[in-house]
Amino acid sequence: MKNESDGRTVGRSTKKLVPLLRLAHARSGDKGDTANVGLIALKPEWYPILVKQVTAARVAEHFKGMITGPVERYELPNLHALNFLLHGALDGGGTISLKTDAQGKVFSTALLRLEVEPPG
Amino acid sequence: MRVAAGQGFWGDWLEAPYRQVTGGPVDYLMMDYLAEVTMSILQKQKSRDAARGYATDFIPLMQRILPLLVERGIKVTANAGGVNPRACAQAVAETARGLGLGGKLRIGVVTGDDLLERLDGLLARGHELRNVDTGRPLTDVRDRVRSANAYLGAWPVVEALRGGADIVITGRVTDTGLTLAPLIHAFDWQPDAWDLLAAGTVAGHTIECGAQCSGGNCLVNWEEVPDLANVGYPIVDAAPDGTFEITKHPGTGGRIDVAGVTEQLVYEMGDPAEYITPDCIADFTTIQLEQSGRDRVRFSRIKGRPATDKLKVSVAYFYGYKAIGTLVYAWPDAYKKAQAADRILRQRLADLRLKFEAILTEFVGVDATHGPLARATAPLDQLPEVQLRIGVRAPEQAPVERFTREIAPLILNGPPSVTGFAGGRPKPEEIVAYWPALLDKRMVEPCVEFVDV
């Protein structure tokens, strides 16, 4: 259940956007130079909103300038969660990295800054 | 059948294992000590002293809990053995004898993961140990390798338990294998019972980071997580059919709910349908979670697939040097001053013609965690203080060493209102980097031995 970037963006709407923080929580970690962000809907009924709006392409655009590689997205409908792999996110990763967040621990909340259309 | 997590990493809360064995009934205490880079540090210690190379914190911990373990019949699985499990076992045995536990304890030792002495033989036989991220063959860095270990799975630990071990001390056994092994042993799960092995693997993944699934580091209503000062570490309460609950001892702090457990499930996740271990492939898209009681989450319907014919190998190799220097700038114009200092420092480094592989500047208080996403909304002209944090990396030590002498002068010859240099000049640090590879399973033969106390 892997989706490649599909170039989708949020459609033109007059609805006021809200930060993803209102609809989801997240935890992130590292694998080498890749950060992973698990994004979890705060309510199961909000999961389809994440699937529709938080595409790999939008996440790649969101992290522009912070990552050097592509973004992959995986779906976990059973957990109402998406998993993002942000490649080239950690300045080489692990011990090589000079970053404060060398292990990608707070990419989670950085993703929750993304603005989305709220439900209803 | 209850497996309790006692340590999520080497450096985790020292009180946790003691509380796990005293706070209520458990059958096993599982402790994970090894991260990728830990093995190279331990290898270095072993090269200086043949009796070292294991997680030394494990010994005083065992000193404290061994009498309780024996009294209550609680068994231990721990990868505290690092690159010298036999020496670790000897140290535990001596400690046990000192406590008057002679004749009451059998220690199982799992080795066979250490490939350092076998590398050239493997390379000569055509096992290239290519870096799975970059595709490069290990010969690129062969002369700089500091440690090389295959990840063993649950089965050698099971063999030790079947042989009557009370304490199983291993080298590089997977974090998940330390939890899966007691379940296989207790329920007599078969090597091809992929769904059951996957369930035990998911259980292991859930508790391998200790309290990170029982209220620690959880974003949802984080201020309402009760009594984190007394956080209860997680316990797997498992059934023979592969269903299990994650819970914790009564009266402890923290919180076990679907939200927190889900955060841990997605932690360090790659493709969730293919969580590959030496024992099986677990499919995380099949896990069903349910809040089955207060501080109890039930797992069911987990599916697995056959294990691959490869083992993951973790190689650590010398990469170069790095150093990180910091200075703190105060209001007014804290951010502007820090930016100016960064420009001045970079010009001086350039004028000295120092060659670096990377120079990275972060402004802590502005962009160190969320980069440009944070800069866009922060009140940049009113910040009370900003820490300039600048790091350099190079293959050679000399330019890094010179860099460390360029921070302090800025206090007197750079922008004003600067402080925070009490720690002194930063030290150049050796970088030992991680090289993940795969190896044919048949090339690795786990070995199980016993030490009777």
Image (spheres, rainbow, N blue to C red):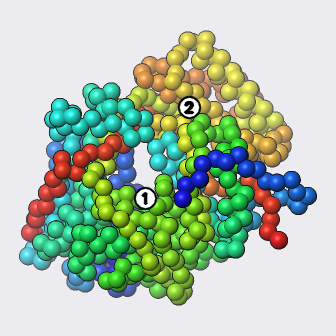
Residue drawn at (18%, 72%) of the image? B161
The numbered mark, 2 or 1, whose residue comes first in the sequence reads 1
Residue denoted by label 1: B274
Mark 2 closeness class: few <14, some 14–19, many ≥20 residues within 10 Å: many
Q: Image quarter for residue B316? A: top left
Mark 1 closeness class: few <14, some 14–19, many ≥20 residues within 10 Å: some
Q: What residue type is labelled 1?
A: Glu
Please tell me whether mark 1 sits on a helix, a strand or a loop: loop
Q: Position of residue B142 (x, y in %)?
A: 28, 29
Q: Is residue B265 shown above or below B241?
A: above
Of labels 2 and 1, the one closer to you: 1
- Is residue A112 found left or right of B214 in the rendered image? right
Residue denoted by label 2: B391
User: The disc numbered 2 marks a residue on which chain?
Assistant: B
Q: What residue type is labelled 2?
A: Gly
**Separation (CA) of disc 2 from disc 1:** 36 Å
Residue drawn at (66%, 74%) of the image? A44
Residue drawn at (27%, 40%) of the image? B147
Q: Is residue A85 shown above or below B394?
A: below
Q: Image quarter for residue B175? A: bottom left
Q: Position of residue B224 (x, y in %)?
A: 65, 75
